[in-house]
Amino acid sequence: MNKLLLVTLVSTLASPVMALATPGSAASANQANAQCATLEASHLKAQYQVTNAKGQSWQMTLLRDGQDFIIQRDNTTFEQWAPNGEYVRYFPVEKRSVTYRKGDLRALNIQHDRDQLYHVVSPALPANLAKTELKQLPCFAAQGFEGKVNGMDSQLDWIASIELPQQFNLGEVLSYQLLKVEPYSHEVFAALTQNYQDIDFADVGDSESDPFIAKMINQGFIEHGSSGFYNSEGHAIEAQGGHGSHSH
């Protein structure tokens, strides 16, 4: 299948953020203008609303720190992806983490498109679609595109300055809507992963006597839910049988 449509779902990290809507007061306008001036593509937090064909909706959050980034899908776990393609899954309640090396990912037959994860949709997608209107938002210009994606009539509003979609509609199957975005510092990003007790995935099999490891395996987080990838129905791909390509 076309790797442009790899879907990652995460839930929100709680913190003050800047809405994309036009500010309603002078004070909020000044605050928004200040954030606009300091917003960089490589250091930001973006929150999306995602809706599927059944009308089910959830939120996803992306944090960028240079070429490192974090994806969080609920309050129990989040992943940090490194430039080399390896990632660490964190469990904030337990203050534990599991590191997945390249060899682990190969052994699990987990495939991913790192560029697409970093940009929510593949950054090559605009080149495959026709330009439409240019929308002016409070902090950005979003270029519209439309065309066929995996055979479905689709629309994309792409914000080139932060290399993210303002919205993306994959036919009637799936839609992303950017809700809020704000600057995100290296210090705050780094603080999220401090003081965790880490284990390599390769050592998990030898650590099943560890109550945390046993619990995570039983709940499917470590062995069967390790990639953090979901399909357009919002279900973990591994839970549906197999660790094959996570594109659709």
Image: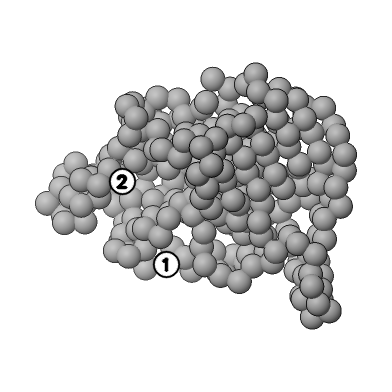
Query: Residue 36 placed where, x, y %?
Result: 78, 65
Confirm or deny contact between disc 1 and disc 2 (CB under 8 A).
Answer: no
Residue 221 numbered tag: 2
Q: Residues within 10 Å of mark 1 (few under 14, many from 20)?
A: few
The quarter of the picture where the N terminus appears is top right
In this view, the mark in front (1 or 2): 2
Residue 34 in view of the camera: no
Q: Earlier in the sequence, mark 1 or mark 2?
A: 1
Left or right of 130? Residue 57 is left
Q: Residues within 10 Å of mark 2 (few under 14, many from 20)?
A: some
The residue lying at 54 percent from left, 64 percent from top is: 189
Query: Residue 170 placed where, x, y %?
Result: 64, 32
Give the answer, above or below, for where 90 lies relative to 235: below
The residue lying at 67 percent from left, 51 percent from top is: 178
Give the answer, above or below, for where 47 lies relative to 248: below
Residue 27 in view of the camera: yes
The residue lying at 46 percent from left, 35 percent from top is: 233
The quadrant where residue 187 appears = bottom right
Left or right of 214? Residue 23 is right
Query: Residue 108 placed where, x, y %?
Result: 33, 31
SS for callout 1? loop
The quadrant where residue 4 appears = top right
Left or right of 197? Residue 191 is right
The furthest residue to the bottom: 27
The residue lying at 52 percent from left, 26 percent from top is: 248
Q: Provide the residue designation for mark 1.
A: 194
Pick the front one: 233 or 91: 233
Q: CA distance from mark 1 to mark 2?
A: 21 Å
Left or right of 180? Residue 27 is right
